[in-house]
Amino acid sequence: MTTQRLIIAAGWLAAAVLAVLVGVIAVSVIGDGLTGSAGRPLAESEVARRLAAAPEESTTPAPPEPSPRSQRDTETKRTPGGTVVADCVDGAPEIVSMSPAQGFNVHEWDRGPQRGDSAEGEFRGQSNNHDRVKVHVRCGGDTPDVEVEHENRDD
């Protein structure tokens, strides 16, 4: 029975060695296929050679002109309901953007300046429709003034 155990142990050892070799070879083959030569770093001389061979650009595009809005004074106001960006266009108020805070939605948004002397917006709570944050934008010349009114009828 001793020789039978010896043969079984030798078989298990041979199977283990074979499994390890197959695993090492597989990882090596897969690794070469994933990285290949494209993943190797270039020598400094190789980089210089490739840059010298690259075609030169004929012209560099000029940076874009700043928009008129970026040259004016805007006001960013954080409220309990979200963030409002306001501007004055030729002395008339405008709400440029309204980004609701978590738990709020934009309910109303009169961007302006087509209606009267103010632009208005309202954030409303998602879980409580009575939680309202109203914003009113007026202009003093080219500078916007944002008023915030927070109303919660369940308080």
Image (spheres, rainbow, N blue to C red):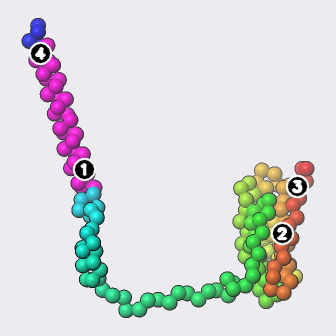
For label 4, the SS is helix
Horizontal side, residue 136 vs residue 34: left or right: right
Residue 139 % position (x, y):
84, 82
Residue labelled with disc 4: 6
What's under tag 2, amino acid-wise? Answer: Val
Disc 1 versus disc 4: distance between alpha carbons?
Answer: 36 Å
* Extreme residue in the left direction: 3
Judge the density around disc 2: few (<14), some (14-19), many (≥20) Cα neighbours within 10 Å: many
In the rendered structure, which segment of residues is drawn in magenta?
5-34
Residue 135's disc is: 2
What's under tag 1, amino acid-wise? Answer: Ile
Q: Is residue 95 above or below residue 1?
A: below
Residue 93 % position (x, y):
81, 81
Disc 4 versus disc 3: distance between alpha carbons?
Answer: 84 Å
Residue labelled with disc 3: 152
For label 3, the SS is strand
Q: Which dot, 1 or 4, sits closer to the camera? A: 4
Disc 2 versus disc 3: distance between alpha carbons?
Answer: 15 Å
Image quadrant holding the N terminus, namely top left
Q: Which dot, 1 or 2, sits closer to the camera? A: 1
CB of mark 1 within 8 Å of CB of mark 4?
A: no
State which quadrant residue 143 falls in: bottom right
Disc 1 versus disc 2: distance between alpha carbons?
Answer: 60 Å
Judge the density around disc 3: few (<14), some (14-19), many (≥20) Cα neighbours within 10 Å: few
What's under tag 3, amino acid-wise? Answer: Asn
Residue labelled with disc 1: 30
